Image (spheres, rainbow, N blue to C red):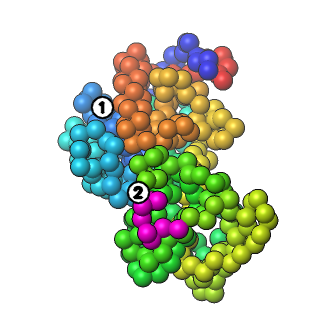
Amino acid sequence: MKMPSSFALTPLGGGEEEAAPALYDLIILGGGPAGLTAAIYAGRAALKTLVLLGTSPGGQAASTETVENFPGFPDGVGGAELAQRMQQQAERFGAETVVDAATAVDFSAQPFTVKTFSRTYRTRSVIVATGAVPKRLDVPGEAAFWGRGISTCATCDGFFYRGKKVAVVGGGDSAVDEALVLTKYADQVFVIHRRDQLRATRIYQDRAFANPKIRFIWDTVVEEIVGDRVVTGVRLRNVKTGEQSLLDVDGVFVYIGMQPATDLFKGQLALDEWGYILTDRQRHTSVPGVFAAGDVQDYLYRQVVVAAASGAIAAMEAEKFLGEFPHPDIALKKSEEKVC
């Protein structure tokens, strides 16, 4: 991806500057591992930093019962606890954190503008770390029963299915891990997978195959979610035989992949065909001064440790960018050179 190599410098108008909101060096959009790690590095670099934690502070990591592969925690650590520790560490180094989310952005000129549910901010640089959200099945009944028997968080909602039967749709790490969590509550957990083998890492597979509460339904997709006021079952279709069946369950947990939370940035940043933000190895986006980190630009790994490293890179690059243009009363205009 080709990045702009030059900027034109234009002084900002004095009168508008005085009436404008306070100017930040860096605003980080997202409070998951990528955003919070970026905040730690930015705070240590003495950058005036604001973190918009979003509506779900901690991101996807916070909804994970136990993170077993993050360095420094040989016995694992709760996802919510890890996120809380990261936030406390960022705040210790001076980063401001707010439970709010961006509703609109303007990256067309310096300083950038970020609007939220509650107010408007100005900033000289931005790190987008809004992460990704679970994909939906897009089948009849899903919209009607979302939140009434359909969930994407076993840690959050598993308690409500004590002594009941539930279905987990998917075959990757998230699906199998959450199926294992659900066995603590449900009497029976059906894992429905469109293939005849799991994509999950071996340690998750071994645990799932050894768990007597988990039953696998292979080569099968969900055609419809049925119920009355709440979910009562799922209609299934075998992709090889075409055979259809009805499985009685009290809940459905969907883990069929993720989609990046980038709707806000369409027309502002270059995205790939799947909606992920395009960056180079230094996490530069198509707009100078705007960086992206974590799952919002990583469609491949989606691991907490990778997101954290990505956030650190983005913060160091933001510091470097700000060091090249140290005066907040100077606006940077993008060159005419095309990107991506």
Residue 28 position in % (x across, y down): 41, 40
Which residue: 53% across, 68% down? 215
As drawn, is 218 to the left or to the right of 10?
right
Give yes or no for residue 209 being in the magenta stretch.
yes
Q: Which residues are magenta?
A: 207-215
Which residue: 50% across, 49% down? 200
Q: Nearer the viewer, residue 18 or 205?
A: 205
Which residue: 68% across, 59% down? 219
The numbered disc on residue 207 is 2
Q: Secondary structure at mark 1?
A: helix
- For the question of whether residue 59 can be seen, the reply is no
Q: Nearer the viewer, residue 64 or 319?
A: 64
The C terminus lies in which quarter of the figure? top right
Q: Nearer the viewer, residue 67 or 128?
A: 67
Residue 131 position in % (x across, y down): 49, 46
Q: Amino acid at mark 2?
A: Arg
As drawn, is 91 to the left or to the right of 178?
left
Q: Residues within 10 Å of mark 2 (few under 14, many from 20)?
A: few
Tell me the CA gap for discs 1 and 2.
Answer: 37 Å
Name the residue that disc number 1 marks: 41
Q: Secondary structure at mark 2?
A: helix
Which residue: 75% across, 72% down? 244
Q: Is residue 153 above or below residue 330?
A: below
Corner quadrant of residue 297: top right
Name which of mark 1 and mark 2 comes first in the sequence.
1
Give yes or no for residue 22 being in the magenta stretch.
no
Q: Residues within 10 Å of mark 1 (few under 14, many from 20)?
A: many
Residue 285 position in % (x across, y down): 55, 28
Q: Residue furthest left?
A: 92
As drawn, is 83 to the left or to the right of 287?
left
